[in-house]
Amino acid sequence: MSYQIKILILSFLASFVISLIIIPILRKFKVGQIERDDGPQSHLKKQGTPTMGGIVMVLGIIAMGILMYLQYRNPEPEVAKHFIPLILVTIGFGLVGFVDDFTKLVLKNTEGLKPAYKMIGLLIIAVIFVIYLTNFMNIGTDTYIPILKEYITLPIFFYIPFAIFVMLGATNAVNLTDGIDGLASSITTIMIACLTVIGIINDVKEIVIFGSIICGVNLGFLLFNMYPAKVFMGDTGSLLLGGALASMALYLKMPLLLIVIALIPIIETISVMLQVAYFKKTGKRILKMAPLHHHFELSGWNENKIVTVFSFITLILCVAGLMIV
Protein backbone atom coordinates (compact mmCIF):
# COMPACT_ATOMS: atom_id res chain seq x y z
CA MET A 1 0.00 0.00 0.00
CA SER A 2 1.43 3.40 -1.00
CA TYR A 3 2.39 5.77 1.79
CA GLN A 4 -0.26 8.38 0.95
CA ILE A 5 -3.07 5.83 1.39
CA LYS A 6 -1.65 4.79 4.77
CA ILE A 7 -1.51 8.43 5.89
CA LEU A 8 -5.06 9.01 4.64
CA ILE A 9 -6.45 6.02 6.55
CA LEU A 10 -4.54 6.85 9.73
CA SER A 11 -5.69 10.48 9.58
CA PHE A 12 -9.28 9.34 9.04
CA LEU A 13 -9.12 7.07 12.09
CA ALA A 14 -7.51 9.79 14.21
CA SER A 15 -10.23 12.27 13.24
CA PHE A 16 -12.98 9.72 13.89
CA VAL A 17 -11.69 8.89 17.37
CA ILE A 18 -11.13 12.55 18.27
CA SER A 19 -14.68 13.36 17.10
CA LEU A 20 -16.08 10.69 19.43
CA ILE A 21 -14.28 12.44 22.31
CA ILE A 22 -14.79 16.12 21.40
CA ILE A 23 -18.46 16.14 20.31
CA PRO A 24 -19.81 14.97 23.71
CA ILE A 25 -17.61 17.57 25.42
CA LEU A 26 -19.02 20.34 23.21
CA ARG A 27 -22.53 19.06 23.93
CA LYS A 28 -21.86 18.91 27.69
CA PHE A 29 -20.68 22.52 27.80
CA LYS A 30 -23.56 23.61 25.52
CA VAL A 31 -21.29 24.98 22.79
CA GLY A 32 -24.22 25.00 20.39
CA GLN A 33 -25.15 26.54 17.07
CA ILE A 34 -26.91 29.93 17.12
CA GLU A 35 -29.29 30.18 14.17
CA ARG A 36 -30.31 33.50 12.61
CA ASP A 37 -34.00 34.39 12.80
CA ASP A 38 -33.83 35.72 9.24
CA GLY A 39 -32.24 32.53 7.92
CA PRO A 40 -33.98 29.50 6.40
CA GLN A 41 -36.72 28.32 8.77
CA SER A 42 -35.55 24.72 8.34
CA HIS A 43 -32.32 25.67 10.14
CA LEU A 44 -34.09 26.59 13.38
CA LYS A 45 -34.19 22.93 14.35
CA LYS A 46 -30.36 22.98 14.30
CA GLN A 47 -30.29 25.40 17.22
CA GLY A 48 -28.01 23.99 19.89
CA THR A 49 -26.21 21.48 17.66
CA PRO A 50 -22.58 21.32 18.87
CA THR A 51 -20.36 23.63 16.84
CA MET A 52 -16.70 24.71 16.97
CA GLY A 53 -16.09 21.15 15.74
CA GLY A 54 -13.10 22.42 13.80
CA ILE A 55 -11.24 21.62 17.02
CA VAL A 56 -11.38 18.01 15.80
CA MET A 57 -9.50 19.03 12.65
CA VAL A 58 -6.95 21.07 14.61
CA LEU A 59 -6.19 18.19 16.98
CA GLY A 60 -6.14 15.62 14.18
CA ILE A 61 -3.75 17.68 12.06
CA ILE A 62 -1.45 18.36 15.03
CA ALA A 63 -1.36 14.67 15.99
CA MET A 64 -0.68 13.51 12.44
CA GLY A 65 1.76 16.37 11.83
CA ILE A 66 3.89 15.32 14.81
CA LEU A 67 3.72 11.66 13.78
CA MET A 68 4.76 12.38 10.19
CA TYR A 69 7.55 14.70 11.28
CA LEU A 70 8.99 11.98 13.50
CA GLN A 71 8.59 9.51 10.64
CA TYR A 72 10.42 11.62 8.06
CA ARG A 73 12.91 13.76 10.02
CA ASN A 74 15.76 11.21 9.68
CA PRO A 75 15.27 9.52 6.31
CA GLU A 76 14.03 12.68 4.53
CA PRO A 77 14.79 15.77 6.66
CA GLU A 78 14.04 18.22 3.83
CA VAL A 79 10.53 16.81 3.44
CA ALA A 80 9.95 17.07 7.21
CA LYS A 81 11.36 20.61 7.28
CA HIS A 82 9.14 21.88 4.45
CA PHE A 83 6.05 20.03 5.61
CA ILE A 84 5.86 21.69 9.06
CA PRO A 85 5.15 25.27 7.83
CA LEU A 86 2.13 23.96 5.92
CA ILE A 87 0.84 22.49 9.18
CA LEU A 88 1.57 25.67 11.15
CA VAL A 89 -0.13 28.09 8.75
CA THR A 90 -3.21 25.85 8.61
CA ILE A 91 -3.42 25.63 12.39
CA GLY A 92 -2.84 29.40 12.57
CA PHE A 93 -5.90 30.13 10.45
CA GLY A 94 -7.86 27.62 12.53
CA LEU A 95 -6.86 29.41 15.74
CA VAL A 96 -8.19 32.73 14.41
CA GLY A 97 -11.48 30.96 13.76
CA PHE A 98 -11.33 29.37 17.20
CA VAL A 99 -11.05 32.78 18.88
CA ASP A 100 -14.11 33.93 16.91
CA ASP A 101 -16.10 30.79 17.81
CA PHE A 102 -15.02 30.94 21.45
CA THR A 103 -16.08 34.58 21.71
CA LYS A 104 -19.51 33.83 20.23
CA LEU A 105 -20.30 30.47 21.76
CA VAL A 106 -18.51 30.36 25.11
CA LEU A 107 -18.32 34.03 26.07
CA LYS A 108 -21.81 34.50 24.57
CA ASN A 109 -20.85 37.58 22.56
CA THR A 110 -23.17 37.07 19.59
CA GLU A 111 -21.07 39.31 17.32
CA GLY A 112 -17.97 37.22 17.93
CA LEU A 113 -14.55 38.56 17.05
CA LYS A 114 -14.80 41.96 15.38
CA PRO A 115 -14.41 41.59 11.59
CA ALA A 116 -11.44 43.99 11.59
CA TYR A 117 -9.65 41.95 14.29
CA LYS A 118 -10.40 38.70 12.47
CA MET A 119 -9.03 40.11 9.22
CA ILE A 120 -5.91 41.41 10.97
CA GLY A 121 -5.30 37.95 12.45
CA LEU A 122 -5.68 36.27 9.06
CA LEU A 123 -3.52 38.94 7.43
CA ILE A 124 -0.67 38.45 9.91
CA ILE A 125 -0.61 34.69 9.31
CA ALA A 126 -0.80 35.13 5.52
CA VAL A 127 2.06 37.66 5.51
CA ILE A 128 4.28 35.41 7.64
CA PHE A 129 3.66 32.41 5.36
CA VAL A 130 4.24 34.32 2.13
CA ILE A 131 7.45 35.87 3.48
CA TYR A 132 8.58 32.39 4.55
CA LEU A 133 7.95 31.04 1.04
CA THR A 134 9.77 33.86 -0.73
CA ASN A 135 12.62 34.66 1.69
CA PHE A 136 13.41 31.45 3.55
CA MET A 137 12.33 28.65 1.22
CA ASN A 138 13.43 30.68 -1.80
CA ILE A 139 10.51 29.14 -3.67
CA GLY A 140 10.58 32.08 -6.06
CA THR A 141 7.71 33.99 -7.61
CA ASP A 142 7.15 31.62 -10.53
CA THR A 143 3.44 31.12 -11.07
CA TYR A 144 1.99 28.40 -13.28
CA ILE A 145 -0.47 29.44 -15.98
CA PRO A 146 -3.01 26.66 -16.58
CA ILE A 147 -3.92 25.87 -20.20
CA LEU A 148 -0.73 27.60 -21.42
CA LYS A 149 1.16 25.07 -19.26
CA GLU A 150 4.06 27.39 -18.55
CA TYR A 151 5.41 29.46 -15.66
CA ILE A 152 5.76 33.21 -15.53
CA THR A 153 7.97 35.03 -13.05
CA LEU A 154 6.04 37.73 -11.23
CA PRO A 155 7.81 40.79 -9.77
CA ILE A 156 8.22 40.33 -6.02
CA PHE A 157 6.38 43.58 -5.28
CA PHE A 158 3.35 42.14 -7.13
CA TYR A 159 3.66 38.50 -6.02
CA ILE A 160 3.59 39.16 -2.27
CA PRO A 161 0.28 41.09 -2.19
CA PHE A 162 -1.15 38.68 -4.78
CA ALA A 163 -0.26 35.64 -2.64
CA ILE A 164 -1.67 37.30 0.48
CA PHE A 165 -4.88 38.06 -1.43
CA VAL A 166 -5.13 34.38 -2.46
CA MET A 167 -4.86 33.26 1.17
CA LEU A 168 -7.37 35.78 2.50
CA GLY A 169 -9.72 35.12 -0.39
CA ALA A 170 -9.61 31.34 0.04
CA THR A 171 -10.22 31.44 3.80
CA ASN A 172 -13.18 33.80 3.50
CA ALA A 173 -14.63 31.93 0.50
CA VAL A 174 -14.63 28.58 2.32
CA ASN A 175 -16.02 30.34 5.40
CA LEU A 176 -18.98 31.64 3.34
CA THR A 177 -19.51 28.19 1.78
CA ASP A 178 -19.93 26.61 5.21
CA GLY A 179 -23.68 27.10 5.62
CA ILE A 180 -25.35 23.69 5.31
CA ASP A 181 -24.51 20.23 6.60
CA GLY A 182 -21.41 18.75 4.99
CA LEU A 183 -21.03 21.29 2.16
CA ALA A 184 -17.70 22.94 3.01
CA SER A 185 -16.11 19.71 4.25
CA SER A 186 -17.19 17.82 1.10
CA ILE A 187 -16.00 20.26 -1.55
CA THR A 188 -12.74 21.14 0.22
CA THR A 189 -11.89 17.44 0.48
CA ILE A 190 -12.29 17.14 -3.30
CA MET A 191 -10.23 20.28 -4.01
CA ILE A 192 -7.43 19.31 -1.63
CA ALA A 193 -7.41 15.80 -3.09
CA CYS A 194 -6.93 17.40 -6.53
CA LEU A 195 -3.91 19.39 -5.30
CA THR A 196 -2.56 16.26 -3.62
CA VAL A 197 -2.75 14.39 -6.93
CA ILE A 198 -0.78 17.24 -8.54
CA GLY A 199 1.76 16.81 -5.73
CA ILE A 200 2.01 13.11 -6.59
CA ILE A 201 2.44 13.86 -10.30
CA ASN A 202 5.18 16.44 -9.61
CA ASP A 203 6.75 14.36 -6.81
CA VAL A 204 6.32 17.08 -4.16
CA LYS A 205 6.28 14.71 -1.20
CA GLU A 206 5.54 17.26 1.51
CA ILE A 207 2.40 18.32 -0.34
CA VAL A 208 1.33 14.69 -0.75
CA ILE A 209 1.78 14.03 2.99
CA PHE A 210 0.03 17.24 4.00
CA GLY A 211 -2.84 16.79 1.54
CA SER A 212 -3.37 13.18 2.63
CA ILE A 213 -3.61 14.30 6.25
CA ILE A 214 -6.14 17.04 5.48
CA CYS A 215 -8.28 14.73 3.33
CA GLY A 216 -8.24 11.96 5.97
CA VAL A 217 -9.06 14.33 8.83
CA ASN A 218 -11.81 15.92 6.74
CA LEU A 219 -13.40 12.59 5.87
CA GLY A 220 -13.37 11.48 9.50
CA PHE A 221 -15.07 14.73 10.51
CA LEU A 222 -17.54 14.47 7.61
CA LEU A 223 -19.04 11.31 9.12
CA PHE A 224 -20.43 13.53 11.88
CA ASN A 225 -20.96 16.65 9.74
CA MET A 226 -23.09 15.21 6.93
CA TYR A 227 -26.87 15.70 7.06
CA PRO A 228 -28.29 15.64 9.66
CA ALA A 229 -25.12 17.03 11.23
CA LYS A 230 -24.16 16.01 14.73
CA VAL A 231 -21.55 18.76 14.81
CA PHE A 232 -20.65 21.91 12.84
CA MET A 233 -17.09 22.99 12.11
CA GLY A 234 -17.59 26.70 12.88
CA ASP A 235 -15.03 29.29 11.82
CA THR A 236 -12.37 27.11 13.43
CA GLY A 237 -12.83 24.55 10.69
CA SER A 238 -13.76 26.71 7.70
CA LEU A 239 -10.84 29.14 8.07
CA LEU A 240 -8.50 26.20 8.66
CA LEU A 241 -9.62 24.48 5.45
CA GLY A 242 -9.37 27.68 3.42
CA GLY A 243 -5.85 28.19 4.72
CA ALA A 244 -4.86 24.63 3.84
CA LEU A 245 -6.23 25.00 0.32
CA ALA A 246 -4.45 28.30 -0.34
CA SER A 247 -1.13 27.25 1.18
CA MET A 248 -1.03 24.10 -0.96
CA ALA A 249 -1.81 26.05 -4.14
CA LEU A 250 0.89 28.63 -3.40
CA TYR A 251 3.45 25.97 -2.47
CA LEU A 252 2.78 24.20 -5.78
CA LYS A 253 3.06 27.60 -7.56
CA MET A 254 -0.48 27.07 -8.87
CA PRO A 255 -2.71 29.67 -7.17
CA LEU A 256 -4.38 30.47 -10.51
CA LEU A 257 -5.67 26.89 -10.64
CA LEU A 258 -8.01 27.82 -7.78
CA ILE A 259 -10.03 29.88 -10.26
CA VAL A 260 -11.02 26.55 -11.81
CA ILE A 261 -11.18 24.02 -8.98
CA ALA A 262 -12.51 26.43 -6.33
CA LEU A 263 -15.20 27.91 -8.56
CA ILE A 264 -18.01 26.98 -6.13
CA PRO A 265 -16.54 28.97 -3.18
CA ILE A 266 -15.73 31.82 -5.58
CA ILE A 267 -19.33 31.94 -6.82
CA GLU A 268 -20.60 31.74 -3.23
CA THR A 269 -18.48 34.79 -2.39
CA ILE A 270 -19.55 36.73 -5.47
CA SER A 271 -23.20 35.98 -4.68
CA VAL A 272 -22.82 37.67 -1.28
CA MET A 273 -21.06 40.70 -2.77
CA LEU A 274 -23.71 41.15 -5.49
CA GLN A 275 -26.56 40.67 -3.03
CA VAL A 276 -25.20 43.33 -0.65
CA ALA A 277 -24.32 45.81 -3.42
CA TYR A 278 -27.67 45.44 -5.19
CA PHE A 279 -29.65 45.70 -1.95
CA LYS A 280 -27.81 48.88 -0.91
CA LYS A 281 -28.51 50.44 -4.29
CA THR A 282 -32.12 49.35 -4.89
CA GLY A 283 -33.47 47.99 -1.61
CA LYS A 284 -34.22 44.72 -3.46
CA ARG A 285 -32.54 41.31 -3.51
CA ILE A 286 -31.13 39.42 -6.48
CA LEU A 287 -31.27 36.09 -4.64
CA LYS A 288 -33.79 34.86 -2.11
CA MET A 289 -30.88 34.69 0.32
CA ALA A 290 -27.09 34.76 0.08
CA PRO A 291 -24.73 32.91 -0.09
CA LEU A 292 -25.94 31.00 -3.15
CA HIS A 293 -26.56 27.68 -1.36
CA HIS A 294 -29.26 29.36 0.75
CA HIS A 295 -30.96 30.61 -2.42
CA PHE A 296 -31.28 27.04 -3.68
CA GLU A 297 -32.41 25.92 -0.24
CA LEU A 298 -35.21 28.50 -0.20
CA SER A 299 -36.07 27.47 -3.78
CA GLY A 300 -36.96 23.99 -2.55
CA TRP A 301 -33.70 22.04 -2.77
CA ASN A 302 -32.94 19.93 0.29
CA GLU A 303 -29.49 20.06 1.86
CA ASN A 304 -28.39 16.67 0.54
CA LYS A 305 -29.23 17.70 -3.03
CA ILE A 306 -27.25 20.94 -2.72
CA VAL A 307 -24.21 19.17 -1.28
CA THR A 308 -24.39 16.43 -3.93
CA VAL A 309 -24.73 18.85 -6.86
CA PHE A 310 -22.06 21.27 -5.60
CA SER A 311 -19.68 18.38 -4.85
CA PHE A 312 -20.26 16.82 -8.28
CA ILE A 313 -19.60 20.16 -9.98
CA THR A 314 -16.40 20.55 -7.91
CA LEU A 315 -15.30 17.04 -8.90
CA ILE A 316 -15.78 17.84 -12.59
CA LEU A 317 -13.89 21.11 -12.16
CA CYS A 318 -11.03 19.29 -10.43
CA VAL A 319 -10.81 16.74 -13.24
CA ALA A 320 -10.73 19.65 -15.68
CA GLY A 321 -8.05 21.26 -13.53
CA LEU A 322 -5.89 18.14 -13.73
CA MET A 323 -6.27 18.13 -17.49
CA ILE A 324 -4.98 21.68 -17.92
CA VAL A 325 -1.91 21.47 -15.65
Image: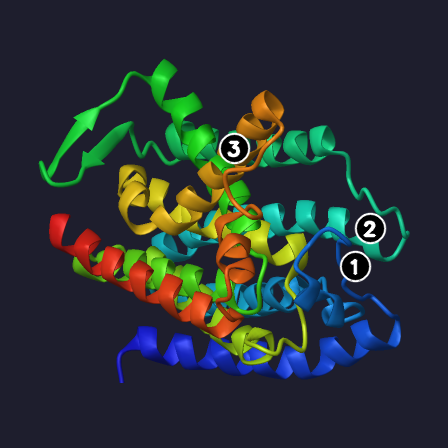
Distance (Cα) linking label 2 and label 3: 24 Å
Q: Name which of mark 1 and mark 3 comes first in the sequence.
A: 1
Q: Amino acid at mark 3?
A: Met
Q: Which mark is residue 104?
A: 2
Residue 137 appears left or right of 292: left
- Residue 56 in picture, x, y percent from top left: 64, 69
Looking at the rendered image, the disc whose residue lies closer to the viewer, 1 or 2, is: 1
- Quadrant location of residue 48? bottom right
Where residue 97 appears, as percent x and y from the top left, is 67, 49
Is 99 on the left-hand or right-hand side of 300? right
Which residue is at 82% across, 76% downward? 27
Q: Quadrant of the N terminus?
A: bottom left
Residue drawn at x 58%, y 31% as measured from the top left: 276
The three-letter code of the residue at mark 1 reads Ile
Secondary structure of the residue carrying numbered label 1: loop
Q: Which residue is mark 3?
A: 273
- Say whether disc 1 or disc 2 marks the residue closer to the N-terminus: 1
For label 2, count other residues whose C-alpha is less than 10 Å away and answer few (under 14), some (14-19) or many (20+). Answer: some
Q: Is residue 73 visible?
A: no
Q: Is residue 222 left or right of residue 17?
A: left
Judge whether 219 appears above or below 262 on screen: below
Amino acid marked by disc 2: Lys
Tag 1 near tag 2, CB within 8 Å: yes
Query: Relative to 138, is 86 above or below?
Result: below
Q: Residues within 10 Å of mark 1 (few under 14, many from 20)?
A: some
The CA span between labels 1 and 2 is 9 Å
| Residue 34: mark | 1
| Residue nearest the observer in this picture, 154 or 51 | 51
2 or 3: tag closer to the N-terminus: 2
Q: Of tags 2 and 3, which is closer to the observer?
A: 3
